Image (tube, helix red, strand yellow):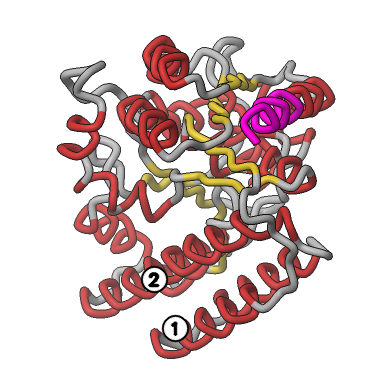
Amino acid sequence: MKIISFPHMGNYAIPLKFMVEKLSNIEVKFAPPISKKTLELGSKYAPDFVCIPFKYNLGNYIEALDNGANILIGAGGGCRFGYYGEANSEILKNLGYNFDFISIGNDNGKMNPKTIYKSFKKLNSELTIFKYLYYLLLTFLMVYFMDKLDIIIRSRIGFAKNQLDFINTEKETLKIFSESKGIIYLFYNYLKAKKKLKNIPINKPKKCLKVGIIGELYTAMEPFASYNIEIELAKMGVEIERYTNLTYLMITKYFNLKYLLNQAKDYVRFKLGADALDNIARTKWLCHKKYDGIIHTKPFGCMPEVSAIPIIDKIAKKYKVPIIYLSFDSQTSEEGIKTRLEAFYDMISMKRSQYE
């Protein structure tokens, strides 16, 4: 019996499961949720100095295989992440696992629809181009609506009388999305969820503290990898802005190059690797919008972000906007991250009070 699985990254496993089931006609089983065990497994078998997304993915693959999966799916990326699927596959085969590995959309880090179609055609010879395009569109809309709802949540959850109202509404919505019967069904439930989120009672000050989160994509989008810093900030009563999401990575990013280069023209002349250019431009934008602080997240040793940090630091100092750099690896302490966030919150709060 064939069973497909893949690593987690935030809530995006839900639309990916939906798409894979519809296009492959094969059972899809979620890997266990990311946990300390996931990281321990990945760290045990991964090279010591590889970045932490590799270790999380490897650990999740091992858990999925132990859970009965025999087909694994991986995707590409704009840096070394583009080679992780094949490297993970070789490590797993050396550990004695027997499985098939399917790489989707790995075309120089881009999600190429033609490449994805060929990948699924290998799994399902009866897949028609019409069915493929329909479910690809439906899945993209699901991701887009999820990202739109997340923006609402990040701007409001820190001021809710009961933050669980937002969390529970999101969970209910994701369950409904996973059972989508078509585009109209999906759109209706998106509007319903949007209205419900906006009707959750909040007590938001007119001049609340606002923090922008920038950095490497995995630590931005996978909450466990960054020790849930967005939830920690929400508990402090902070409005959060985060640009990196799957909609941005799949679509918006590739139309933004000229804009980003123009924004960052005083500091860089060419596109940098992965999200480095994006984060330089975002830093300048956040400073212009007078955000109270910026948080930059990355895996330890992430070269694109390491190369961008001196420029980001220069911009933040020029505009006198506090910035904190959080680097994550298998040795990172959750308590250490919380302590640094608390200190950062105290700093931006005191800075704000000086100007009021």
Helix, strand or loop at label 2? It is helix
Q: Which residues are magenta?
A: 344-356
Helix, strand or loop at label 1? It is helix
**Predominant SS of the magenta segment:** helix
272 is higher (above) or lower (below) than 188: above
The residue shown at (36%, 29%) is 284
Relative to 307, 155 lies left or right:
right
Q: Which mark is residue 215?
A: none
Q: Amino acid at mark 1?
A: Phe
Image location (x, y in percent) of residue 294: 54, 30
38 is higher (above) or lower (below) than 308: below
Whether residue 346 appears in magenta in the rendering, the answer is yes
Relative to 56, 341 lies left or right:
right
Image location (x, y in percent) of residue 210: 59, 42
Query: Considering depth in this image, is 52 or 356 the residue closer to the camera?
Result: 356
The residue shown at (48%, 88%) is 188
The total number of labels drawn is 2
Location of residue 57 by image quarter: top right
355 is higher (above) or lower (below) than 175: above
Image location (x, y in percent) of residue 79: 35, 26
Name the image quarter holding the N terminus: bottom right
The answer to whether residue 41 is seen in the rendering is: no
Q: Amino acid at mark 2?
A: Leu
Name the image quarter holding the C terminus: top right
First in sequence, mark 2 or 1: give its number. Answer: 2
Mark 1 and mark 2 in contact (Cβ < 8 Å)?
yes
Location of residue 293 by image quarter: top right
The residue shown at (59%, 56%) is 155
The residue shown at (37%, 36%) is 285
Query: Considering depth in this image, is 208 or 182 the residue closer to the camera?
Result: 208
User: What residue would you read off at disc 1?
Assistant: 187
Q: Which mark is residue 141?
A: 2
